[in-house]
Amino acid sequence: MKLIAVKGLFGGAGTTTIAANLANAMRRRKHPVIALDLCATNSLRLHFGMPIGDPRGLFRSGRLVDDLREAAFETDNGLIYLPHGEIDEQPDRTDIEGILGGLYELLQRFESPQELIVFIDVPNSESTILNWLTTHAEIMLHVLTPEPRAYPALRYFSRITWPQIQHQGLRHWLLLNQCAPHLELSRDIADLLRRELDPHLLVPTFIQRDQHIPEALATQQTTFDFTIGAQANVEFAAIAEWLEERLEVKQ
Amino acid sequence: MRWFMQLGEQWREVRRKQSRLSSAFYLFWLYFEVTLLNSGASEQFDHADQRLRLNYWFPHVNFQRPRWLDPIRVALQAVWLLLFKTQQERADGLSQRAAERTSILQRLNPWHHRKLASKPVKFATSGFERFFLALLGREWIPSQTLRILITVGAALLVALVISLPMDATDQGLMLLFFWALALWVRNLQGRIPMLLMVLLSVIVSTRYLFWRVTQTINWDVPFDAALGILLLVAESYAWLILVLGYIQTVWPLERRVAQLPADSSLWPSIDVYIPSYNEPLSVVRSTVVAATAMDWPKDRLNIYVLDDGKRPDFKAFCEEVGVGYIVRADNSHAKAGNLNHALKITSGDYITIFDCDHIPSRGFLQLTVGWFFQDPKLALVQTPHHFFSADPFERNLSVFRSRPNEGELFYGLIQDGNDMWNASFFCGSCAILKRGPLEEVGGIAVETVTEDAHTALKLHRLGYNSAYLNIPLAAGLATESLSAHIGQRIRWARGMAQIFRLDNPLRGKGLNWGQRICYANAMLYFLNGIPRTIFLLAPLAFLLLHSYIVFAPAVMIAMYAIPHLIHANLANSRAQGNYRHSFWAEMYETVLAWYILRPTTVALFAPKHGKFNVTAKGGTIEKDYFDLNISWPYLILIGLSFIGAGFGIYSLIYGPRDELVTVTLNLFWITYNLFILGGALAVAEEAKQIRASHRIRVDRPISIMTASEHSYAAELIDFASSGAGIRFYDELPLAPDDSIHVVMHHGTTRHGFPARVVSMRGLTIGVRFEFPDSAAERAFLRATFARADAWVGWRFNETKDQPLSSLREILGIGLRGYQNLAVRLAPPLAPVLGLINRGWGVIMSVLPQAPGTGEEDESLGV
């Protein structure tokens, strides 16, 4: 089992959308894929068409389900997604590690002929989850957008967050989202980031601003199902292929 | 039920665009594709494999627009695909076998290769290959003395083979043996088999010439002797050019890029000169902007437009983009004078020269300057002149990018061969020169009209070296019409003849023998006007004047001349086949022959005459026309040849029996001449050229962002400096006149360029760019014309030369020339010929075609 954590460098970077569509792109490459939502906003499922009023999910009244079968849903093309579940109050912070340990066990029981790939939508504010993922995940993708606020966020990231998330076997990449090649500011910041960051730290493909992405969410589909010709699909497919190489699961 | 509803929905969707019948066909084929190839839109998205599309397998059927004969086309094609191997499959098989062969060769096992050949042949061939590989592998004659002895012995043997008199049978047997040898090694890899073929060709041709000189002049009849000697002189010239050409190109250097020092503070300062005289700003603009976008430290890169036209709009433009603008008081010595004037004003360590239409790619300097650090005596690095528009031959014969063009031989092979002898020369543009040596020879030469080659000659005489880097790093416009093309060639021919007289490379100091041969060949080549005209007229000497200019029995002529032609063709096809296909040279040279005849002759006797003419570029040709001014000499030659052929046929029927073979031989010759002359006519039929800016065909993923910020994946199919053609993959979400952004990738960055949709058809749109400022234009050039890899792999269709199919092509072109002529002479014939052509076209369109050869959509932009 390979865990890929998708995490935003700041709010609104597009983490959930990217986790959903990358999982879908990976599934289209015939891997067994699970999309797992750890955000209490519970919005990952919406990309796969689950009705918004449906409360089912991993957590029920603050407790983790006993059997994954109660929380797992499958899309038409065989992707499995685990919604966070509707909760009334934040779960008890003290026991998050225990919950995650239990979840990991449940996931390990999941049988699949090939290596299972789990995309995790990671909330921004939970340091406990981040710590746990640091020791368990294989790849962490940090999503950011080429905007002025990326700069202070990166400074904070490199000074504070970066030392905390180092662990043997965990690799980090930054993924640029919502690039607007027709706008000078967006282009310049993207160029600047590329120049200043270690080139090995950037995912070579970045995601262009594309109105298809929010529209797909509005109709509760992945962008691939929404508009096959959208540029975003080309990029998600390219990143999925790139991830395949990084994870050494090329088919 | 659900399926039916879906079908109904699709039907309504399609019916909005097409008639009932077309819609039915369209849906039928769509379902056919999905069931037959098991592929829908999703699979096609995942695999860029063309073979998942029906269009790949049925390239001659347009499934969007069905025609009546399509069922027949599909049926025939299906049967053909089932029963026969396609060329691709055969090629795959061949390369597989070749791979097997090499691996077997490594194990040196003679028994397991070439399934078809008999055992002795197999054994001999593999032995041969091993022998050649061994030759390449090591110094196989260790001692110098032994080497000289072997050379002398071999030379004596060759001399004996050349001069030994034989009767027809023995001659035939010997040449059959040579021929078999040449055919045998023809497909063996490596340069040693090529050398063997060249050697055979030289021996056979020299033997032929020796025989001609010693045995075939009829001294008893003065008239015949005079004509005979004329032909002999022409043949000697052809032999000389053949042999010198072999020497020049036998071992191309294939120089690689030299690294620059890692520390960019060591990089020299460079002046870029862009001379212009009367070219429109629209042409010069891209060159200047692209030059400013070259990768080089900005404080050491100075660009100057040298404007001999002294135009105010040029001055304003140069100020706008921030480059130097230089004018001078007079226009003496044209381009050379212009460059020399600038040389006095600027001060960079190196001078780079681009003709005003040659758009440099951003890597030009970084890839060329390195060699100057390797070799302190290096004075010149030349790169190929690459053209992104069709030259008149390519345009008028519709062979753009499908056959090697006329310049390909020179820039692909000859300059590379010259480089081996340290004799590659300056071609006036796309080159970089060192200031010191250039000033030492007094700047660019002004004594002749080919100042470039002459400057290089002077540099070589002073002991400086030159280098040729065979990577297209700049691209420009080819000459726009046949008359302009001929004008340019006349200038080259005249200039080369001038140098030959004023500064003969065979004499004087400072050159090695290789350089002398290469320069001499470059100059002698342009004297081909007279010999070629003689060859065109020669068969008439017998057919019209009944003069035996080759005084020998027809059988002997055939025994000597045919092997000479065949070997020359085989060796040239092997040595040059990738750069010029067999028989095309005949047509190129025939078109020029008449025109360079006079200026070269004049220049040989009065070398100081003649002025510089500027080659017109960037123009348009509004409609098809036939350039009579150009082709009248050929019409006369054709007229004479037809009369000759008439007489020939007459004497074939009513003439004396003992002349039959001679008449037949001459008839073959004259028919060949007629086809070549027909080709010259076909070239003179100027095809229209409407677009002011030329479109570069590419095949590159881009994306389109609509005004609503929807991004679509798309494919750039062509671009020009002002517009582009773009194909969408799945649906076309636009309307004419929409504002969009075309997002292109260059390096790691992406740039969206504002554009407007000007035309639409199917999934293809044409757009016109609307650059907000010159920075955007520069970024656009960097992403297109000036991309570092813009012209790499440009010749996508690298077809190997196949002499017989080349011959067929040339014959076809010749026929086309006569057809055009017939229509010009007798317009009422046009409908008849049109009908024949259409009928032929329909028949051909029904026949099976190789998969994947379908025509691309025509572009629609402005």
Image (spheres, coloured by chain):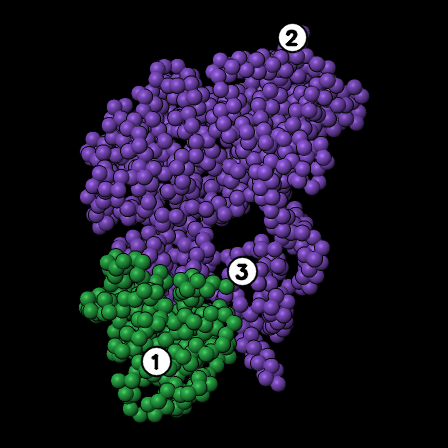
Chain colours: A green, B purple
A22 relative to B111, above or below: below
Provide the secondary structure element on which disc 1 rests.
Answer: helix
> Same chain for the residues at labels 3 and 2, yes or no?
yes
Image position, residue B608 (x, y; %): 36, 20
Looking at the picture, which amino acid does disc 3 mark?
Asp
Looking at the picture, which amino acid does disc 1 mark?
Leu
Disc 3: CA contacts within 10 A as few (<14), some (14-19) or many (>=20):
few
Looking at the picture, which amino acid does disc 2 mark?
Trp
> Same chain for the residues at labels 1 and 3, yes or no?
no
Task: State which mark lies toward you, 3 or 2.
Answer: 3
Provide the secondary structure element on which disc 2 rests.
Answer: loop
Residue displayed at 34% across by 63% down: A203
Which residue is tagged 1? A100
Are the residues tagged 2 and 1 within 8 Å (C-beta)? Answer: no
Residue displayed at 52% across by 25% down: B246
Task: State which mark lies toward you, 1 or 3.
Answer: 1
Quarter of the image for residue A129 reads bottom left
Whether residue B807 is visible to the viewer of this picture, yes or no, is no
Which residue is tagged 2? B219
Q: Which chain does the numbered disc 1 sit on?
A: A
Which residue is tagged 3? B49
Disc 1: CA contacts within 10 A as few (<14), some (14-19) or many (>=20):
some
B707 relative to B188, above or below: below
Image position, residue B576 (x, y; %): 53, 33
A250 relative to A101, above or below: above
Q: Which chain does the numbered disc 3 sit on?
A: B
Numbered-mark total: 3
